[in-house]
Amino acid sequence: MTAVDPPGLLVEGAREVVTMAGGIRRGSGQGEAAVLAASDADLAVACWQGRVILAGRRGDVTRRLAADGLDPDDLTRFAHLDARGGTVTPGLIDPHTHLVFAGTREREIELRRQGASYLEILAAGGGILSTVAATRAASVDELVAGGRRWLVEMLGHGATTVEAKSGYGLERDTELRQLDAIGRLDAECPVELVPTFLGAHAVAPEFRGRPDAADAYVRDVIDVQLPAVAAQGIARFCDVFCEEGVFTADQSRRVLAAGAGLGLVPRLHADELRPSGGAELAAELGAAAADHLGVPSPAGIDALARAAGRVTPVVATLLPATSLFLKGEAYGPARALIDRGVPLALGTDFNPGTSPAPNLQLVLSLAVLRMGLTAAEALAGVTINAAHALRLGDSHGAIEPGRQADLAIWDAPTHAQIPYWLGANLVRAVVKRGRVVRAGAPV
Ligand code: NIG
Ligand code: FE
């Protein structure tokens, strides 16, 4: 908070508060959003020093504040925000993005229209590798400027916490530069960034053409890149693109095990386009998340289901904007995963190649319209379950006493309208750590 901000915030006049209280959502609980509703728009959320004190009827909230010796009408201590009959949810959490890169790839839309597949474009030296060439040539300031543009867009659409990966350097110095840019954006923007090292995103161009290209590159990731990243302490997670034609499950295991040995928690791109053993590997390693899961094998779903009962289960993170953009039908077996008790999260996968979509509201709409989720199930996927996918499940993702006060205030009387207004931005205001960081025009 800046020095001029009062330490407290009272959000008043909400018709609905989607608290998501009660912990991680799995099975039939995926759709239990813990909603407070009041037709007279009398709901309030009180925040103090960046944390939630209470959500409930205004009278109850005021009494609770008084018991703590706080007067909400003391304007030097409380800022006021009028929700004007709208809905309050936890600030949205995007658990999978490639926020920092240089260059654009609109040309690949035309290549795909002519029949080339995503992996064929990559194998021919385009795709991820064209972003790698542009990113290697970019300065850290350029990377920060590019990331800032899209981070502002994410914030404007309700995101308060965003995971961001490296993976467009594929050599030590550029990977470090990307992670440095992510750290700078975290420091300068109200959105909180969670950094992930993704050195194993594709085989670097220097290694291609050798018979042992992927294995040799994996050694570079493990021996050269990972130790440098760990030494600087600038990544929390280690990720791999585990996919037929990119890295095998065995190569992915080596990278993730080495990362874990250096304190980086594993997560992975798993079974996006073909069943590649990714879901099984995520369960075996106790990864924080298995992401994409467009086409996991039945054994992979079984493995995630077995892991679902753990205290820290693997969160299945589906990325429907990518399926839309690649025109695949593979939105992933969301219902089967929920029915098997696997906690489900949703992300944008924002990146220049497969998901130039910084908007989590669009992801909510796709989850409801294309994956068959209810609005409440989808919202759990971008709040409490996304927090767990980032191992922030004890402090983020719900409006509960003591948690970080990250909120989105919506121009909608009920959360059911959030995925319904297709393509509209319904965010009226955004609160990060108890401070209004984005306020929309008065309606
Ligand atoms: O999650 N699938 C691998 N990585 C990204 C795409 C990266 C790119 O094409 O630039 C994804 O879709
Ligand atoms: Fe991705």
Image (tube, rainbow, N blue to C red):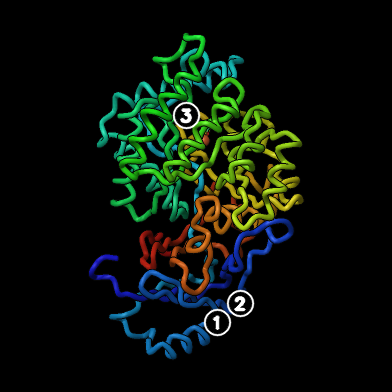
> Does the CB distance between marks 2 and 1 fall below 8 Å?
yes
Between disc 2 and disc 1, the foreground one is 1
> What amino acid is labelled 2 in the image?
Ala
> What amino acid is labelled 3 in the image?
Ala
x and y percentages locating residue 406 in the rendered image: 44, 63
x and y percentages locating residue 31 in the rendered image: 69, 59
Q: Which mark is residue 57?
A: 1
x and y percentages locating residue 337 in the rendered image: 72, 46
Q: What residue sits right under mark 3 in the picture?
A: 200
> What amino acid is labelled 1 in the image?
Arg
Report helix, strand or loop for mark 3: strand
Q: What residue sits right under mark 2 in the picture?
A: 38
Closer to the camera in the image, 192 or 81: 192
Between disc 3 and disc 1, the foreground one is 3
Closer to the camera in the image, 434 or 304: 304
Q: Is residue 372 visible?
A: no
The number of numbered discs placed on residues in the rendered structure image is: 3
Q: Residue at the spot x=45%, y=46% of the render?
A: 163
Q: Residue at the spot x=47%, y=9% of the render?
A: 210
Instruction: Tell me how far mark 2 sits from mark 1, CA to CA.
Output: 8 Å
Closer to the camera in the image, 280 or 27: 280
Query: Is 203 left or right of 302, judged from the image as shown?
Result: left
> Does the CB distance between marks 3 and 2 fall below 8 Å?
no
Query: Is 16 left or right of 350, judged from the image as shown?
Result: right
Instruction: Tell me how far mark 3 sits from mark 1, CA to CA.
Output: 50 Å
x and y percentages locating residue 216 in the rendered image: 46, 18
Q: Residue at the spot x=68%, y=64% of the render?
A: 32
- Quarter placement of the N terminus: bottom left
Q: Earlier in the sequence, mark 2 or mark 1?
A: 2
